[in-house]
Amino acid sequence: MVRRVADDLHASFARIAAIRDRQTQTRIARSEQLTRLLAYFRVILAGYLTRTDPITGARLVDIGTDESKAHGGLSIVLAIFDGSKMKISVDALGRFAHASVPDIFAGVGRIVEIRVADDLAHADLYYLSPGDLRGPIQIEPIDTFLFAMLAKTAETIEAQADEPLTPAPPPTAEPQGARQSLKIDIR
C-alpha cells in the first residue's frame, strides 16, 4: 500500500512538472513573439517616435515594455499622444492578454500567436473570436489594429478642430450722434 501511494505521488508530481514545463516554454516563446512585435513597431513607427505634438509637447507615439519579475509577465504598450493605448502582454502561465483605449480589439477574444516576419516587413495576429474556444483561428495584420487606433485619434483631433470657437459678443449699438468725427487738418 505504501508503495502504491509513493508511485501515485511520483506520477502526480511528474504530471505537474510536465505541465509547468510546458507553460514555461509557452511563456518564453510568446515573450519572444512580443519582443519581435516591439521591434516591428519600432521599425514602422521610427519616424514618429521622436516627433512631438506641437500643442501638448508630447511625443506622437511612445512604445514601452514592462517586465514583471514578481509575476513573470511581459507587456508591450504602444501609446499615442492623445491618450490612446494598445497593450499586449504575456502572463506567467504563457497566456496572452490584450487591452486598448479606444477598444480596437472588440473582435479579438483570445490571442493565439503573433508572427513577425524575419525582416520585420509585416506582423500578423492569430486569434480566436470572442466566445470561440477552438476556432477557426482568425489572422489579421497587426497594422489593422494600429491603423484603427490612429483613425480614432485622427477623428478625435478632427472633431476638436471642427468645434466652433466661442463667438465674440455682438457689438453694442451706439446711440445715434454719440459718435464724433475727428478731423485733423494737415497743412
Image: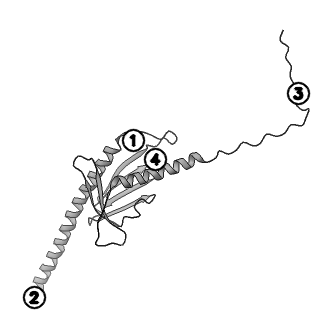
Is residue 182 rendered to the left or right of residue 85? right
Q: Nearer the viewer, residue 8 or 108?
A: 108
The type of residue carrying mark 3 is Gln
Quarter residue 3 falls in:
bottom left
Look at 16% across and 71% down and name the residue there: 18
Q: Earlier in the sequence, mark 1 or mark 4?
A: 1
The quarter of the image holding the N terminus is bottom left
Look at 29% across and 56% down and name the residue there: 124
Q: Earlier in the sequence, mark 2 or mark 4?
A: 2
The residue tagged 2 is 2
Q: Give me the C-alpha separation between circle 2 and circle 3.
A: 117 Å
Q: Give me the C-alpha separation between circle 2 and circle 4.
A: 66 Å
Look at discs 1 and 2 and give the one toward the viewer: 1
Secondary element at tag 4: loop
The type of residue carrying mark 4 is Phe
The residue tagged 4 is 81
Secondary element at tag 2: helix
Q: Earlier in the sequence, mark 2 or mark 3?
A: 2
The type of residue carrying mark 2 is Val
Is residue 105 rendered to the left or right of residue 31? right
The residue tagged 1 is 48
- From this view, report whether residue 159 is shown above or below residue 47: below
Residue 44: x %, y % from top left: 33, 45
Q: Give me the C-alpha separation between circle 3 and circle 1.
A: 59 Å
The residue tagged 3 is 180
Q: Earlier in the sequence, mark 3 or mark 4?
A: 4
